[in-house]
Amino acid sequence: MYEIDKIDLKIVNLLLEDGRKSASEIARQIGEVSERAVRYRIERMIEEDVIRLSAVVRPEALGLPIRADVWLEVESDRIREVAQKMAEYENVTYVACSIGENDISIQVVAKDTDEVYRFVTETVRKVPGVRRTTTSIVPLIIKDVYQWRAPETVVKK
């Protein structure tokens, strides 16, 4: 497990604001660390798989303003297989296996609700092993996964 300190946490939070922010700008904003130290810390956190720097595509900017959460009930011996299949679809942005009422959770992006309906009924429900689906249109996202900030309670003192 990586032991994050208060400087690492500040660096991560500044990169969350703008992933293109330079090490010199981060060092200037933090004030108690050099540009070289910031570069080293970023590289170390990337190598340790604590952070990943990448572009985040906004589906609505590409003409896909509709998001839907779809929960799948699946035959117990096919959960992983069905989840892998869901991950192959280009309009599926998230796939997770869960424990509870549903076996798999996916998020779908689409140009309209009709496209969501067709995808769920004509594609998802026809995948071998899928027993049942439940779909919810998501009209508003307050906080997305890439906006999550590591809590200060993880900082090692």
Image (spheres, grey):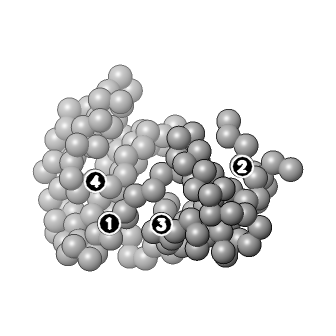
Query: What's the amino acid at mark 3?
Result: Gly
Q: Nearer the viewer, mark 2 or mark 4?
A: 2
Residue at point 67%, 75% (across, down): 29
Q: Are marks 2 and 1 in contact (CB under 8 Å)?
A: no
Left or right of residue 104, residue 87 in this image = left
Left or right side of 23 for 121: left
Distance of mark 2 from mark 1, alpha carbons?
28 Å
> Marks 4 and 3, how far apart in space?
24 Å
Expressed as whole percent of the image width and height from the top left, the position of residue 76 reads 38, 26
First in sequence: mark 2 or mark 1? Answer: 2
User: Which amino acid type is shown beneath numbered disc 1?
Assistant: Val
Where is residue 138, by image quadrant? bottom left
Q: Which mark is residue 96?
A: none
* Mark found first going from the N terminus, 3 or 1: 3
Query: Can you identify the residue that label 3 sits on?
Result: 19
Q: Which residue is mark 1?
A: 57
Q: Secondary structure at mark 2?
A: loop
Q: Nearer the viewer, residue 130 or 10?
A: 10
The residue that label 2 is drawn on is: 4
Q: Which residue is mark 4?
A: 92
Q: Earlier in the sequence, mark 2 or mark 3?
A: 2
